[in-house]
Image: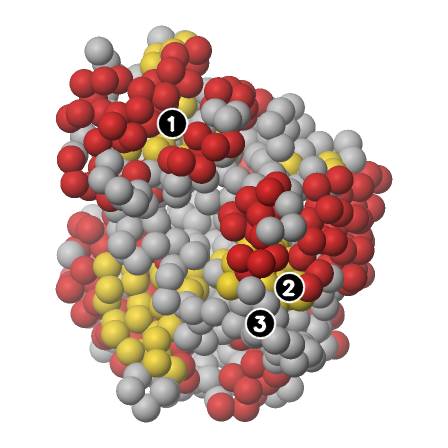
Amino acid sequence: MYIYDHFDRQIVSQRVAQFRDQTQRYLDGKISDEQFLPLRLQNGLYIQRLAPMMRIAVPYGTMSSIQLRKLAHISRKYDKGYAHISTRQNVQLNWPKLEEVPDILAELLEVEMHAVQTSGNCIRNTTADQFSGVAADEIEDARPYCEIIRQWSTFHPEFAFLPRKFKIAVCGSKSDRAAIMMHDIGLQISHDTSGKTAFNVFVGGGLGRTPVIGSLIYENLEPQHLLTYLEAILRVYNQLGRRDNKFKARIKILVRAMGAEAFKAEVEKEWAHIKDGDLTLSAEEIDRAKSFFQSPSYETLAQQDMQALALENADFARWLQHNTHEHKIPGYRIVTLALKTVGVAPGDITAEQFEAVADLSERYGFGEIRSTHHQNLVLPDVKQADLLALWKELDKLEVASPTVGTLNDIICCPGGDFCSLANAKSIPIAEAIQRRFDDIDYVYDLGEIELNISGCMNACGHHHIGNIGILGVDKKGQEFYQVSLGGSQGLEASLGAILGPSFAQNQVPDVIEKVLETYVSLRQPEERFLDTFRRVGINPFKESAYA
Amino acid sequence: MPNIIKDQQISDDSWQVWRDAATLPESGGYIVPLTLWLEHKDSLKALGDIAVFLASDESPKALANDITELNLIAVDFPKFADGRGFSYGRELREQLGYKGELRAIGDFMRDQLYFLSRCGFNSFALENSDLEESLASFKDFSESYQPSIDQRLPLFRRR
Ligand code: SF4
C-alpha cells in the first residue's frame, strides 16, 4: 500500500486545519450557505434528507486492517455503529454531525485517510479494478498509476471548480472490472509487443441522465505523458464544458457536442504546450509509485485442486465457486465478502464486521482489504489451504452468502431512505427481489446476472449498465420504477434498453420474475442472460412483462 | 480609495471596473471589457492607464498580441463556482508569458485565494470579506503536488 511521507502528511493535516477553520467560520455566520457548499462537498460532506452524509475516500479501493479498525471506531463514536460501501469504492457515514466532521477528518489522518474531493465539482477519487495486483488476468497493476493520479488531482489549483464532477478509472487487466467506459476518463493499461506499458484513453463516458459510453481518443499513450495528457483534457473541459445547465455540464455532453475527433484536436492543441514540460513523469517517480505496490512475501505453494476442495461440504463448494477468484500466484485465491445480507441495505457494514474483517485480513493475508464497486469487500491473498477455515468465519459474520456475481449480488444506491435527491426508495426494492429469489438453486441456474438499482437519474446504482436495471421515477408524486434490460459493463459495455412504462413498487418482483422466466425459456445451453438478450432483443421480454 | 490584496498585502487601489461594453470611458484608470479593448484599442490607449478584463467565457488567447502593452489584466468571476478563470490565469502566465498584474474581480471568495494565486493571480479585489483576516488563506497549504508559477517543479521532482 502507499505510505505517506512527511509531504503527504503535512498536506492532509493542513487540509484538516483548513476545514476546521472553514466550519468554524460557517458556524459563526462568516461564510454563507452557498459558499460553504463547495467547501464542505470537497471534504465529502453532503447535507442529506435526514442528516449530513459523509463520504470517506478509499483511493482505488485499497485499505489496511489498521484503517478498517479506525473506520469501525469512527462509525461507533460519530455515527450509529455502521457504515456503507458506495458504488465508487468509498465508505459513507449516514449520520455524522457537522460540528464533528473536522474531528473525524483528524482521526482519519491518523491512519492516512481523508475525505478529499469525494464530492463536489472536482476530480473525484480515482477508482480501479478491485483485484489490482492479484488478478490472474492482469496485464499490469493499476494502483501505482492511480496513486500518481491521486496526487496530481489532490488540491489541483486549476480544477477545483469544474463545470461538474469528474471521475477517472483505471483498469490494468484483460477483463474490465472498473467500468472504465462509464467514466469521464477511463484508462486502460496495455502492453505493446515489446512489453512496454501504454494507456488507451477513453473520454466522455458516464451514467446519469444521459448515459454514454466513452470514446477512445488516444491509443498507446506512453506513461511519462500520463499527467500532461490528463491535464490537457481537464483544461479543455474546464474552459469549454457547459456551465449554464447542470444536467448538460459533464464532459460527455461536451465530447458529444463537439464530436470526439474535434475534442481530441482541442486536447492535442493544449497538450502541445505542456507535453514534455515539468509535469512529465520521470522514470524515478513511476518506480517510486511502484515500490509501494510490490507483491507481498507469498509462500511457494502447490496449486490445489479446487474440485477436491469442494468435496468438503456442499455449502462451502457453492461459496468457493461464486465468491472466490483465481489468483496470479499458485496456491492462493481471491475471496469476495458479500455485503448483501437480505434485510440489510446492500453495502452496509457494522463496526463489529469491520473489526472482524480486519482481524481476518491479518490472519488470512497481509492485512489488506479491497472495496468493490459492487459494494462488497475483498480479501486479496488467501491461501487455498485456508479457504475452508476462512469460510466458516465469514459465514458466522454473515458475509459468506454465496451469491457474488448472481442476481442477488445487487448493486443499490442509498435511495429514498437516505438521499435527498431520490425519486424513490431503492433499498426495499433490493430486499423484495432478494426475498422473491431466495431459492439458491434457481439463482444459480440463472447464472451470471447483474441487477442494479438507482433511486433517481443520477444513477449512483449504475442501473444503465445492469443486465437488469431498475430506476426510481416520480409519477405524480408516487414512487414508480422503470426497468431496463441488456446493460453491461466491461470492455463490451452497453446501455440498457427501457422495457416500457414504469411499475408500482409491489409489481417489481413479479416483473423481474417474468423477465427471468422469459430468459429461461429462450436461452440456449450455457447462454448468459446478456447474450440471450442480445440475440433475441427486447420484444419477447416486453410481451411477457406487460401480458 | 478601495483596498485590494496585492502580492499578499493590503494596498490602496484606484482602478475601477468599466462594465459597459458599448461606450468608452472618458478618462483612464478603468479596467474595460475585452470586446471594448479589441475594438477601440487606440482610443483607449490615448486615455492613459487602461486595463482589460476577461469575462468568464472569454479566452485570454484574444489578448495574445497585447500582452506586453498591458500592465494589468483582470479576470471576472461571475459566480465563485465558475472556475474557468483558474485556467485563464495559468494560460496567461504560462503560455502567453504575461508578467504584469493579474487580478481576480467579481464573485470569488476568500477560500479560493490559495488556488488562485497558484494559478498566477497576484491581485484580488475581494469583496464582502475582511481583508486582514483573509490573508491567512494564502497560507492554507505550505506544499502542493502540482507545479505552479512560484514553484516550477511538481512535488515528485523534489522528493
Ligand atoms: S441515484 Fe439518486 S437516489 Fe440514488 S444515491 Fe444517487 S442521487 Fe441519491
Q: Which mark is residue A384?
A: 2
Q: Is the C-beta separation of discs 2 and 3 under 8 Å? A: yes
In the image, residue A43 lies at what x, y percent? 63, 49
Amino acid bearing label 3: Gln
**Label 2 crowd bin: few (<14), some (14–19), many (20+), radius 10 Å:** many
In the image, residue B147 lies at what x, y percent? 51, 78
Asked if residue A193 lies left or right of residue A358, the reply is: left
- Kindly report the distance in space between the C-alpha atoms of the residues bearing marks 1 and 2: 40 Å
Mark before the other along the chain sequence, 1 or 3: 3
Q: Nearer the viewer, mark 1 or mark 3?
A: 3
- Work out which quarter of the rendered image holds the C terminus of chain A and state it: top left
Q: Nearer the viewer, residue A131 or A19?
A: A131
Please report the residue visible at 82 percent of the width from the left and 39 percent of the height from the top: A76
Amino acid bearing label 1: Leu
**Mark 3, chain letter?**
A
In the image, residue A203 lies at what x, y percent? 30, 60
Q: Which mark is residue A303?
A: 3
Please report the residue visible at 25 percent of the width from the left and 74 percent of the height from the top: A219
Same chain for the residues under marks 2 and 3 in the image: yes
- Kindly report the distance in space between the C-alpha atoms of the residues bearing marks 1 and 3: 44 Å
